[in-house]
Amino acid sequence: MREPEERAGAECERDLLLRVARDAMIEHGLEPEFPAEAMAEAGALPGQVVAEVDVSDLRDLLWCSIDNDDSRDLDQLTVAQALEGQGGTRIMVAVADVSVAVPLGSALDGHAGANTTSVYTPARIFPMLPERLSTDLTSLNPDADRLAVVVEMTVDEEGAVSAERVYRALVRNHAKLAYNAVGAWLEGSGPLPSEAEAVDGLADNLRLQDEAAQRLKARRHEQGALELETIEVKPKFDGDSVSELVAERRNRAKELIEDFMIAANGAVARALEARSFPVMRRVVDSPERWQRIVDLAASLGEDLPAEPDAPALNAFLLARRTADPERFPDLSLSVIKLMGRGEYAVSFPGEETTGHFGLAVDQYSHSTAPNRRYPDLITQRLLKAALANADALYPPDELLALAAHCTQQEDAAQKVERQLRKSAAACFLSGQIGAEFDALVTGASPKGTWVRTLVPPVEGRLVEGEEGLDVGDEVRVRLVYTDPVRGFIDFIAASVG
């Protein structure tokens, strides 16, 4: 049995998790704090960032943001316009113009390029950019004029995207909305949020956005995009103690934003390619362990082809979602694990490109969250240079190195976030040693076997009784050990001992 880590007896769980987060970031090559030079640059910025060229004035459109309940770094706004007499809908996505406040080569850029992403932990968010930017000057906050890059697309009645246009604009957020409230309203289980009700015409616009998003989604699934649903777990605090692990599931509002962002990211990649610019793409190749996915489907009475086939896999997923909606998130998690990780890659004019297997798209970038992700900031700089008929800013070798670095740092950030979720869960479970849970195997390799309990949804290591188990298998487990400092949660198979 593992020995518990030393911890101060008086240290509260919130402080412990913050200490663990800082240590984990340093261990994985991330910087938990901003250098003084970056903070000085942020402090010296004027209260209103001004464009260096003329931009379109779109402040009167019914822009709104839809994000997490507690989000303060607002990267996108959306709005829809019905195309009378033409059919279809014009969708517009406004992305915060972050690059105007973060010059290439500045101290702010240096820190952002070191971490490449914001890191989200239960005790604290470690933002990629100082809060004066990410939650203020470059955040698309309500009732504030902000610079943005706008992606405009026409979505026809069949869900196909055409007439794409990308340009710079001045925008204004008329309502800060949240996924859960908007999702409940769209699904008919809750009222229209008061923030939306206060803006004349916004309810109808949200309906129009939702209708277009549903067409986009249906079209992508026809082309093989995977219908996946995972459970996001957020620890809740009662004072300074972890009191609850809340499972958050997808809803119509989350799907709306996801579908619009996928469309916008594709439009940005095509805009760069059309101007003979390099593109930093987000790619996911064919699944690394397709045979195991085939075996998993067979165990549920379904057949999949011997070679990777996205439409066939999605048909299987849709069938399972209908047959067993309660367990569908568990199946989704297994498929995601077996597909392998995504990565950043750069394509140059004239080169063949790798697409995104899970999204069933050939052209795809990350461009819609420049406050939170460095690849999006790089893409925004490239896009603005392309729109201005300027040079590409980055030499090819530098772009290739940045793509590899962003992939590496994203993996590091995910490890930190995963460890902190486990640390928070270990705090919550520390009084339940000996309890038994139904679980699903989420990882199996020579390094060890991992399981996720169904209620509460917690991942830990199976230290005994793991022989013969593989990803997707169901197992009954008993909790035998927790260590919040190291994020250890150990189970044994319930039949052991």
Image (cartoon, rainbow, N blue to C red):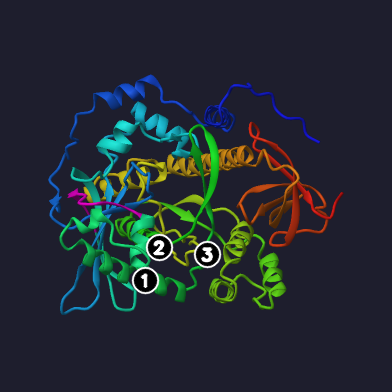
Q: Is residue 162 above or below residue 478?
A: below
* Distance CA(mark 1)–CA(mark 3): 15 Å
Residue 269 in view: no
* Quadrant in which residue 156 is drawn: bottom left
Q: What element carries label 2?
A: helix
- Percent x, y of residue 20: 58, 30
Region in magenta: 166-178
Q: Which mark is residue 214?
A: 1
Q: Residue 255 carries which label?
A: 2
Q: In this view, does 427 lie above or below 188?
A: above
Q: In this view, does 108 lie above or below 139?
A: above
Upstream in the sequence, badge 2 or badge 1? 1
Residue position for label 3: 228
* Residue positioned 29% across, 40% down in the render: 98
User: Marks 1 and 2: in contact by CB < 8 Å?
Assistant: yes
* Distance CA(mark 2)–CA(mark 1): 8 Å
Left or right: 78 as drawn, with respect to 12: left
Identity of the amino acid at label 1?
A: Gln
Left or right: 322 as drawn, with respect to 370: right
- Percent x, y of residue 489: 69, 42
Q: What element carries label 3?
A: loop
